[in-house]
């Protein structure tokens, strides 16, 4: 409680409370990551990617790295959305150059192998990282915790890997919605435990990543995206009423209007394809928006970066806005371009 | 001209003119394809996938196949959006199990290898297929010709293969917009030639597939999706004012409103993630809509298929609507499920 005055004064917290500021706060999805040489060096000290996530000292270090280079308004816990399936007892392996691979689950028997009981203990190193960060971040930097949203996490658990069309999970959800619902419920419960403990350890904001929220028809979007998100938000409100929750239903298009109205989230993060004028009228009028610079402008740099960043600053300038990307920073991004972007945003006056 | 009365009476043509019908016409993206055993048999007679597209007799046969099984209101020319790069002189190879692979172009020198002059001659077998189909289809079946939209075709030409994040093409378009514009212009010109000749040979409707239209920021969506599409539509209107053009900007979300207003297209095809109520209000009120059943409901069948098809029929029932999928039929689709869907739609009464 002694930290509250500082927390309230942070630029990110103000924007998420809907305040009008002289310039928006800025942080960047995947701001700690492979595009930074110091990240690659720290990463090489860990056995594999999961080991990095579970090593409080190393995870704290990589979370800090972008803050040493850039004048960002928030740090985001270094972790991965697949720690939840790992904690539930599903095998998760990160193969070099291939991304995550899981023992795919696609029936009731597969569900039987998952177990909620060990989740909190399994994730203890993550809470230690959060506590480290909470103690070590500069006073003006907000600390963001996060999890994947149940649908997106389920898409990996059922598909066994990332899949742009989420073929396996969609077919299963259509075929056996009541069995699939058990998986969604299990992930939802585990996620509530996980996020509550992140907040207890010092996370000041929560972001829910729904990276594979695109393509779902209305009814499935309501049942598998909106309903579990609403359940998580409501549970967090009960235990931690003052912690803002940012939802990121990537690729959801016009369905974002329903998502914003029905999940109870504090703010909505926009992918790069969301029209700024449309979002201003249909979303920002109701809640703070975050986004939505195309991460490939950060690779390109130069005029494209200046033009796109300025367009977004102008477009969202008058309402509550958190400057961010429309998706994570990609590995081939030159760090100088990130520095340039941060200069543009921090030098901006509405 | 002697065919005009028949053309005007076809259910698809009526819906695309905005008429209210007792039930919508139905056709299905990729209705001719790998899910049909007879397709696989015909396909095995050709050297490779491109050879199938360039063999008028075989391409005519596979176009007819789904019409023999199902009471569909349209046939769509069997071809591929990558015939344009192939005709422009870029090497295109379809590798078994891998999809298309092209010699990627990413600079001015690469553009120099492309040539418009041979396009019409190279594509002559496609026009022969269209003529065959025009002569052989039943009187109530409309014939749809198609091409890829320039942005999507460019994403393959620059990336060398399909890519959900269109990394290469987006980076190039941000870095060197004026050089990239030459590629878009070249594809646009080739596409106009290609589609005009398809119409001359008997195509009654044109569909433009923009499968990778998602994620683009406003300015890039305007320049690389809307502007070239508008140019194609306008050129076709000049030469063939009565031929409807259906646009399919897959994943474009709320940007579809601008697309519908500014491209001049006759009708808009919706991916499965487009909310039906939103589309009714924001799109169908202005132009006919096509879609948007999730292709994975066709894999699942049963209750999911009944429920989803009925929801879409109810949702779009009162306005001009062409029943279709939100994306192409996938290979694991049981043909019986397609038969069931066609029964549901043809048995529907508004």
Image (spheres, coloured by chain):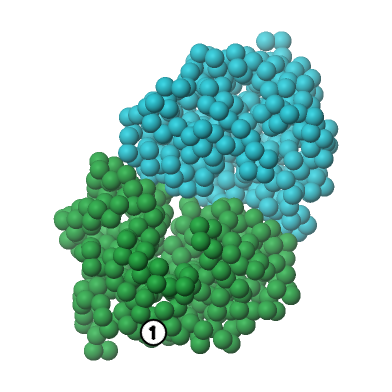
Chain colours: A green, B cyan
In the image, A321: left or right of B139? left
In the image, A239: left or right of A162? left
Percent position of residue B268, x then y: 55, 37
Quarter of the view holding residue B221: top left
Residue located beneath label 1 in the image: A128
- A278 relative to A128, above or below: above
| Quadrant (top left, top right, bottom left, bottom right) of the N terminus of chain B | top right
Q: Residue at x 39, y 26 (%)?
A: B109
In the image, A286: left or right of B319? left
Q: Residue at x 64, y 35 (%)?
A: B94
Q: Residue at x 67, y 44 (%)?
A: B97
| Quadrant (top left, top right, bottom left, bottom right) of the C terminus of chain B | top right
- B324 relative to B19, above or below: below
Quarter of the view holding residue A269: bottom left
- A25 relative to B80, above or below: below
One can see residue B216 in this view: yes
Figure disc tally: 1
Quarter of the view holding residue B72: top right
Q: Residue at x 37, y 27 (%)?
A: B108
């Amino acid at each position: 409680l002694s930290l509250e005055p500082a927390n309230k004064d942070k630029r990110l917290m103000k924007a998420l409370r809907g305040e009008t500021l002289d310039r928006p706060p800025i942080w960047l999805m995947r701001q700690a990551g492979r595009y930074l040489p110091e990240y690659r060096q720290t990463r090489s000290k860990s056995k594999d990617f999961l080991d990095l996530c579970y090593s409080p000292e190393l995870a704290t270090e990589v979370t800090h790295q972008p803050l040493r280079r850039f004048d960002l308004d928030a740090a985001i816990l270094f972790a991965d959305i697949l720690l939840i399936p790992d904690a539930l007892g599903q095998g998760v392996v990160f193969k070099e150059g291939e991304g995550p691979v899981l023992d795919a689950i696609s029936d009731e028997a597969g569900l039987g192998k998952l177990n909620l009981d060990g989740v909190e203990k399994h994730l203890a190193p993550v809470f230690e990282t959060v506590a480290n960060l909470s103690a070590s971040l500069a006073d003006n930097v907000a600390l963001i915790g996060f999890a994947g949203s149940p649908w997106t996490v389920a898409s990996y658990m059922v598909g066994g890997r990332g899949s742009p069309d989420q073929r396996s999970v969609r077919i299963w959800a259509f075929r056996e919605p009541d069995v699939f619902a058990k998986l969604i419920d299990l992930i939802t419960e585990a996620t509530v435990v996980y996020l509550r403990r992140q907040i207890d350890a010092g996370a000041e904001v929560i972001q829910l990543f729904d990276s594979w929220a695109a393509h779902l028809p209305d009814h499935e979007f309501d049942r598998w995206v909106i309903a579990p998100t609403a359940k998580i938000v409501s549970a967090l409100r009960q235990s931690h009423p003052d912690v803002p929750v940012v939802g990121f239903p990537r690729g959801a298009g016009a369905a974002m209007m329903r998502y914003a109205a029905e999940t109870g989230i504090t703010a909505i993060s926009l992918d790069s394809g969301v029209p700024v004028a449309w979002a201003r009228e249909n979303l920002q009028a109701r809640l703070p928006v975050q986004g939505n610079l195309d991460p490939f402008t950060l690779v390109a740099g130069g005029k494209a970066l200046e033009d796109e960043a300025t367009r977004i600053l102008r477009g969202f300038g008058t309402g509550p806005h958190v400057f961010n990307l429309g998706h994570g920073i990609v590995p081939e991004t030159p760090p100088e371009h990130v520095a340039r972007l941060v200069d543009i945003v921090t030098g901006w006056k509405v």
